[in-house]
Structure formats: structure tokens, C-alpha cells
Image (cartoon, helix red, strand yellow):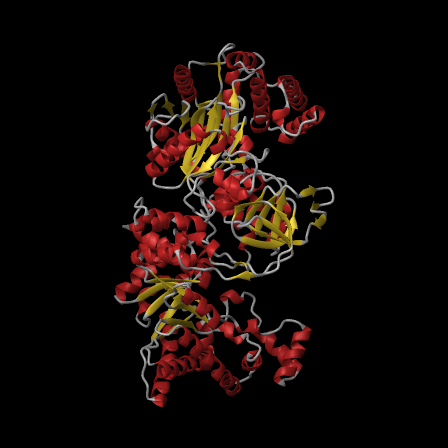
Amino acid sequence: MTKSVFKFGGGTAEGDAKQKELLGGKGANLAEMAGIGLPVPPGLTIATHVCAAYYDAGGKLPDEVARDVLEALAFVEGVTGKHFGDASNPLLVSVRSGARVSMPGMMDTVLNLGLNDVTVEGLATASGNERFAWDSYRRFIQMYGDVVLGLDHYLFEDALEIAKEDKGVTQDTGLDAGDLKALVGRYKAIVEQALGWPFPQDPHEQLWGAIGAVFGSWRSDRARTYRRLNDIPESWGTAVNVQAMVFGNLGDTSATGVAFTRDPSTGEKAWYGEYLINAQGEDVVAGIRTPQYLTKAAREKAGAKAASMEEAMGQVFTELGRVFDLLEGHYRDMQDIEFTVEDGRLWMLQTRSGKRTAKAALKIAVDMVAEGLISEAEAVLRVEAAALDQLLHPTLDPKAPRDVIARGLPASPGAASGAVVFDSDTAEQKARAGEAVILVRTETSPEDIHGMHAARGILTARGGMTSHAAVVARGMGRPCVSGAGSISIDMATRAMSCGGRRIVEGERITLDGATGDVMLGEVATVEPDLSGDFGALMVWADKHRRLKVRTNAETPADCRVARQFGAEGIGLCRTEHMFFEPSRITAVRRMILAEDTAGRAAALAELLPEQRADFAEIFRVMAGLPVTIRLLDPPLHEFLPHDDAGFAEVAAATGLAESLVRRRIGELHEFNPMLGHRGCRLGITYPEIYAMQARAIFEAAVLVAQETGEAVVPEVMVPLVATPRELEITKAVIDAEAATVFAETGTTLEYLVGTMIELPRAALRAAEIADHAQFFSFGTNDLTQTTLGISRDDAARFLGPYVEQGIYPKDPFVSIDEDGVGELVSLAAERGRGVKLGLKLGICGEHGGDPASIAFCERLELDYVSCSPYRVPIARLAAAQAALKRG
């Protein structure tokens, strides 16, 4: 049978960091740390494959696994000298999740498990600290009641607030043993009143309940949402870690903390973290208490008064620093570490590669190359390609006026403006309607995951730099300001107040996640600086990638942005976008409404110089690079109005009778224009349209070639071809215009004619079509629509449940459907190149900027991908990563 339970601690470990698929990230790293001699409390890991078995058994742990857990628990008892459920010297354990990849705040945890009315007295006697024992018991009841019994944690928090008010203290540390003992009584009464039975006293019942709850949390709504947002398969499951408790709440010689070996926001090589004296780990990450700084330098920079760990616990801090250096050198990556100090002794509870902003990821990768820790190729693989999007957009203009209404901690960098909303459901609802929102909460919890994703930025009144809001926001690339203590939120009136000012829901604010400033209104922005670390990484990426990266652009401004970002040509210039310009829409409509060829020709003659000027400017900007221009694609009705006012306006502008306008528009009406008279079908029916566009392309190319002396190689793309004969006929029109222009100007240029493969029939008949084509560009947007029979404009209504239920692994309009659409692309590539060895192949749908789709294109050995200008760097990095992984 497959081994299901693995022990670690006491100087040994049944596993290591290479076994994340089996042990989960937390379990694998605990085993690794134990194996290299770090002080790790002993424990056991239930493997990830047991998660599926748990669900298959209807939410029950298999009997053989339960036996193995008890055997491993006996090992933990042997290492610690304590016994689970013992009245005089009880072993307490934590029960935590541990998926293959970090899912901060998404999964459930229970601490201090094993306490009951008897063992709490034994803990008090054994520790000599009655207050600590009752504090641990009240924490356990609250966590177990929330995680396992399903009670609202606010029931317990309200009781705690009342206890503090009665005592006249602001912090839970101000409650003595008697207060905490009374609070435990209230907590137990809350449980019995809500459920109708008393809080469970049997430690083994507690253990099985907690293990089941952790497995159960794998399918919680928040975990499902996180997995969907981060492409984590449900089939992976989670491991469960049961570990001996060590206590940071034993008094002033004890503490707990979270630390990073480098700054996860900026990437600076400086220890970064927070700690709390006389606390447990949940106090730090949940934002219940404001933590203190780890280092003296960080404290002084923030102007904080409370002593840093470096100052308050110097000896332990020095030992912690040695562990930081050891772990970063061992893993060759920035580490995110959880630790506890129990009565002056350091214990390591977790290490993992830390989540970081894109800016930090760049700096850390480049710095580690300079430090000799990793190679250039490893640095390229270290930075998530999609995360570069965080760096490619404007940030706040430092010179712009700012009306600062509050300040908090700079928890996640970047800038965002939007309307204030106070709950996650509202954030998601407004974001779906296209409104930019800022989610404002007292503190966030895992249940806020959907709202955090929907929001442009996140603001919390409580919490530190390692709170739930901070960690999740950094992982998502959302600007976040946490711990803005001057903010008070009134959910009854849906407003917040700060500094004597009141902001109601819907008013706009701006967050600066780099400074912690909260500003009223919107603040001007500046363009990003893409030099330095960004430039270095792109140079390394370009060394390793094979795929060329082009852009989808049809305006000179977009072309300039794309060139700045390293585009190597244009893969898709959509000429219809040019037709909507105010200066030419009237001529376009006159052409469409014309009753005969002569009328169309007259209108097209007006459009010719406009199109020529467009193409000439694009050729100038993209000098020396290939430019693929798609001939007119959409159905003609898209250029016409659909209401009475519009009919009258067109009639007045064109000089045609309104009755004729109405009749002609009626004739052009189509029941399903997506599959109607569009693309090359227009060129077959009205060859004069494509002839005008071809002439404009070649005249512009000759003009720019004569101006610059550089080679201009236009690539003319015919859309929506389904048969080889369509391309043959249309190509003849294009070739004829080229010959005429070359004869008139005395200049001959190289040019290519190809087609967009966006219909299943075209993919299947690619061999015959290749006889007439010099390139294929896969229009994967329409190919996805026509293959799956799904409209991308309507798919959002139902694709979410499809992805959640595993019908499609990802949204097929975001990441290419490899089994369906991808199979057609593969088939067309193979058949096309089988006929024409040098056939150029690329994709120009939105998939051209998706890293997973780029990896697919690399495997097919396509020549290029094309994407929107701001995704060009993402595509460059993703292409390099795909090439390196392919080997």
C-alpha cells in the first residue's frame, strides 16, 4: 500500500523538500528543516492523496490511515516526553493544512488541540503558568468552534471584547487567569447554546474532527476561488500536518513571528517581518493585535516606539538570523518563515518560498544572479510571467497633489483609484458592472477572497505587513494599505470616518501601496520605468526564447508602446478599427449603402488616401519589422446605426433618402452575423473593397521604403478563409494591385499573402490552403468560438461553473483549449508545413499573451505569438520559460 503518514522531528524525517506532491509544501519543508538539524517541533504529515480518499469515503478518514496517525502520534509523544490527553503532562498539537503550493489564509488551522477541562489544569501545573493554560484553552475553543463546529467566530470575539471592557483593558494580554477561566466558561456556553451539546472533551474526538475539517476546507468556497484564480487543480488535494505545540504565549520571554529573508514588496536584501511577545501565530496573521517590527532599522524607519525583536530578544534574534541565512542558502530563494520563541528557545514552524510582488521578484532574481546563488536561466524561471503586468502600467505621479486622509502600512505596492465599497459581495458586483472599486474592511478574512480579486486595491483598518490582507494582496498584485488605524467603519450607514472626515460608499479614493497613503479622489499617474532589473531580466529572457513576439496594434500610439516593450513586428493590424474614425465613417457608410459597383468605387476612392496614410505611419513606426495587416473582417452592418436617430443622421451625412437608408440596412441584417457575410466573403462579393485596401498597403509600403531606405515587408492577411478557392481568388486581387503599384512607382517590394485560420474547416484543409498561402496566423479567438460553439461575448454567464466543475480546465477564451482548439492548430500546422516547408506560423488571438498558451505554441514550434502591446513583455518572458522547460 502507498504510505500515507510520515513522521518528522527529533533529528529525523521521513521525507524532504522534493516530495511536495506527496507531503504538501508545509510538510515537505518541515521534513527538510528537521533533516538539516533545525529546531522543528516533532509531528506527522498525512499525505495529499488521503484527501481524495477522505472525500471518496463520504468525509471519513480510512481506518488504516487512522491507525498510522495514532502510531505516529506515539512517536511525537516519545520525542516530547508528553502524552496526548494526559491529565498531568498533556501533549497539545496543532492541525494545519499543507497543499503543494502556498494558499495563504485559504485553508483551516486549529491550535492547542488536546485541551479539555482536565488537561488544562495539568498544563497549568506542568508549565507553572495558570494564565497561559487558560489563555491556550480559550484560544482552542474559539478556533475549534469556528473551524470544526462551524460557529461564527464573531460570537467568541464579542465575548472577548466584553471581557476586556469589563476588566477595563484594551488588549487580551491584560486579562488574568481568573478572567480567562471565566471567558472559557462563556465560550463553552456559546457552543452548547448554538449546537445543543457541550464542547467535546475527548482529545481523540477533537483530533479526528480537526483533521476532517482541514480536509473539508480544501473544498470551501474561498479555497475553490483561490484555486480558480491561481490555476491550482482540485485533484491535488491537501496534506494535513499534526505537530506538537510550542507556545509563544508563555509570557514576556516568549513570542511568535512571521519573517521574510528579503523584503517581499521591494526585494531589498534586508530581513523583513513582525513579531508579538506573549502571543500565538494567529495573532500576527489575523491582524487582531498590531505586531512589532523584527529589526531595529525597520522600527526606526517606521518611527515606531515599541521595541523590535532585535532589541528585546537580542540573543534569540541572532540565532534567528543564522537560520535565515541557512535557509535562503539551502533553498536558493527568498523564504517566508514562521517561528515561535518558547521561554527563550527558538522553534521553526514553517519555511516556504515567499510570495512577492513582481517588482520584488525581479530584484530578488537579478540580485541572486549577482550573488552567485542562481543562474541567469534560473532567474528567468523565477519570475512569474503574468505577474509582470503589475509593472507595465502607470503609478502615482509624485508631483501630483494629494489630499491624504489617512495613513497605514505599505503592505503591497502599486497605486489604485476607485469607489469605496465595504463588503466583498458589493465589490464583486460593481466590478462585474465595469466599475473600479476599493475594498475597505476593518480586516480581511479568507471569505473576502472574491472581493479582493474584484477590487483594484484593498484598505484595512487593522493588521500588519504580514496580515491576511497584505499577504493575499501581494500574491494577487493588488495595491494594499493595511493597519490604517485612524479609519473607523460604520457598516450601518456604509461610511467610514478618518481625521474628522466622512467618506460614504461610492466616493472615490486612491491608495498608494508603496507609501501607505490613502487619498481622497483620484491622483494623476506616470508611466513605469522599465530599465534596471526589468531590462536585465528581459535581456536574459531574449537569450533563451525561440518564439518571436509581435503585437496586435493598429494605431501609431499602440505601435510605439509595443516597440518600447520589445515587440518584433505586428502580428495583427485590424483595418476595420480605422474605418470608425470620424473623418472616414461617412465614406464607409456611403460605400456600404451604394447600390452598385460604381457607387462603392467612388466611396472607396475617398477612403484610399486615408488608409494609405494609416499604413504609412504604422510602417514608419515599425521600420524594419514585419507588419501583418488583416483585410476587412466584420460584417458591414457593424458600421451602420440601428435606431431612428441614427438613420436620420446617416441620411443627412450621405445625402441619401432616409427610406433608402432604412431599406439598405434592412437588406444587410443578418440573424447570426458571426457566421454570416464577413471576412473573405466580403472580398469575394465586393472585390473592390479588398482591392482598395491592398493598393493602400502597397502604396504606403513603397512610400516608406523610398523615404527611409529600409526594407518594408507587408504581410497581407485574408480573414475567415474556409476553402482554398476563397484564398486563391482573393490572392489574385491582392497580387494584381501589387503589380499595378509596383509598375506605377517603379519600385518592387517583397510581400507575403497569407490567411487567418479561424474555422475548423480551414484547419482540416490546411494542406490545400497552404498551396496559396505564405503564412498562417491562427485567429484563436474565433477558432475557439467556432470549435466550441460558444460566443465569447456571452460565455461569462456560464463558463465559471464549467471551469469549477472541471468541464474545461480553464476559461478557453483566456487559455487555449489544447484538447480541442489546440488539436486543430496542431493539425493545421502539421498539414500546412507538410506542403510548404517554410510556411510561417503564428497566433494572433488573445491567447498570444497567455503564458500557458505560449508554452503550447512553443511545443508546436510555431514561429511567433502576437498579443496586445502591454502584454509583450509577458509573452517574451513566457516564451523564454517555455523554451527552458522544454529543454
Q: How many marks?
A: 0
In the foreground, 743 or 353: 353
Vertical side of 634 occupied by 584: above or below: below
Where is residue 539 drawn, in percent x and y? 33, 58
Where is residue 627 drawn, in percent x and y? 38, 72
Where is residue 440 drawn, in percent x and y? 63, 45
Vertical side of 79 occupied by 577: above or below: below
| Residue 448 appearing in the image | yes
Q: Quadrant of the N terminus?
A: top left
Give the residue displayed 57% in from the left and 82% down from the top.
590
Where is residue 728 drawn, in percent x and y? 35, 75
Whether residue 201 sits left or right of residue 732 in the image: it is right
Whether residue 458 sits left or right of residue 626 in the image: it is right
In the foreground, 266 or 660: 266
In the foreground, 567 or 847: 567
Give the residue displayed 44% in from the left and 28% down from the top.
316
